[in-house]
Image (tube, rainbow, N blue to C red):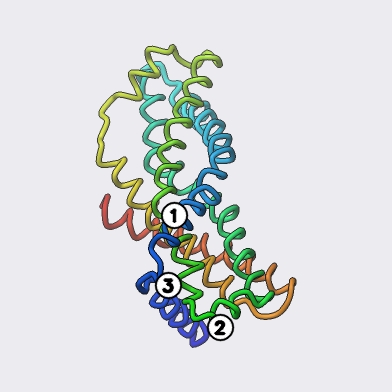
Amino acid sequence: MIQGLKMFGKYLSLLGNVFSRPENKKVYFRRILDEMVKLGVNSLTIVSIISLFMGAVVTIQTGLQLSNPFIPKYLIGFATRESLVLEFSPTMIALILAGKVGSSIASEIGTMRVSEQIDALEIMGINSSAFIIQPKIIASVLFFPILVVISMAIGMFGGFLAATLGGIISKAEFLQGLLYWFQPFYIFYAIVKTVFFAFAISSVSSFFGYYTAGGAIAVGKSSTKAVVYSCIVILIVNFVITQLMLS
């Protein structure tokens, strides 16, 4: 318990240093764009593949559960949309990104720490935590919601393909279900969750990478801790936000 409180205090102290005023705004802006490409654009492929098959599987399983002839077929499309928007796209994609992006951030910063690159930045009078971590957090918070919206669209397309090619329901029925009783607030809810998830993934992973101590083995351990703790924080934040916004 005490060790956990110390770690949390250390984490908050690091965040205080991270969000100090940038020394050179142009340099930070370029770094943010680079991190958007590295952390966001490079994750598009895996997000798209997972979302496509996730939407298809949700549609097939929903179709099996709603096979009663007294239940309108278009509800399959409705259930698919609600499942993707409310939970699957924001939460599942965040967990996937915690593994891909989180481990990448922790290993990159951890390698910089053990190779003394961070010490060199400090010697030059640069706020190393802000220079290294701040662009990663900002890029994640800005780009991860875009990934989740893309995931929703591709997931619905995957569901559409599974429904029509698999003979579950017709195109018109599935599209009717996708449009049925649409609530824009649910999109807002998903984006809010994603912003918090993005902050958790980037900041927690950076924390473990920044305080890596040792050699190559320590970098691997930091990367593993980053993924595990990021996933735990995502699940806790998911529960809290859902309770606050949907209860």
Q: Name the residue under label 1.
A: 139
Type of residue at label 2? Ile
Above or below: residue 109 compared with residue 38: below
Where's residue 161, x and y in %? 51, 20
First of labels 1, 3 by sequence position: 3
Disc 1 and disc 3 in contact, CB within 8 angstroms: no
**Residue under label 2:** 123
The residue under the point 59% across, 40% down is 46
Mark 1 element type: helix
x then y, percent, for residue 200: 45, 62
Closer to the N terminus: mark 2 or mark 1?
2
Q: Is residue 35 left or right of residue 243?
A: right
Discs 3, 2 touching: Cβ within 8 Å? no
| Depth order, front residue of 147/164 | 147
Badge nearest the viewer, 2 or 1:
2
Q: What amino acid is labelled 3 in the image?
A: Val
Name the N-terminal-most of marks 3 and 2: 3
Q: Which mark is residue 18?
A: 3
- Give the residue drawn at x 26%, y 53%: 245
- The secondary structure type at the circle numbered 2 is helix
